[in-house]
Image (cartoon, helix red, strand yellow):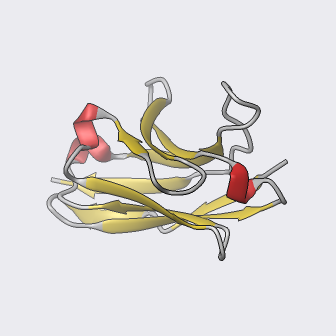
Amino acid sequence: QVQLVESGGGLVQAGGSLRLSCAASGRTFSTSAMGWFRQAPGKEREFVAAISWSGGDTNYADFVKGRFTISRDNAKNTVTLQMNSLKPDDTAVYYCAAHRPPGTWSGWGQGTQVTVSS
């Protein structure tokens, strides 16, 4: 099982950037696809981005394409979400998760708050 801890959130002005990190522990990290999700107040949690176990394949929600980049370092057991051109609508708690068992997301951390001011 993978345990996850997110960090890197904060307050930023619209148009700014933040870099979120997800530190993972557990032997299955390097063989697990990983994802970032977010949940804004009063809204359902939604998918943001995902990356395959090797890092060779990525997938993004339409609303972040061209602005966010997901990457991973299996040697360091970390997954990163680089967020550029941030908008107030990006304000949410951001979570990372492991795609394990296949078809499910697990290992949810406590999340990290991202607040974008206009």
Q: Nearer the viewer, residue 12 or 17?
A: 17
Q: Is residue 8 above or below residue 63?
A: below
In the picture, measured across the screen, residue 39 lies left or right of residue 107, that is left
Rendered residue at 23%/43% (across/down): 65
Q: Position of residue 87 (x, y in %)?
A: 20, 49
Q: Position of residue 6 (x, y in %)?
A: 60, 60
The part of the image, by quadrant, that contains residue 41 is top left
Note whether 92 is above or below 114 in the view shown. Answer: above
The picture quadrant where one finds residue 7 is: bottom right
**Which of 40 and 34 lies nearest the eye of the viewer?**
34
In the foreground, 100 or 112:
100
Residue at the image point whose x is 66% and y is 75% from the top: 75
The image position of residue 51, as x and y in percent, is 49, 48
Q: Which x, y percent locates residue 69? A: 34, 57
| Res 117 quadrant in image | bottom left
Q: Residue at x 30, y 54 (%)?
A: 68
Number of numbered tags placed on the structure image:
0
Classify 15 as above or below 108: below
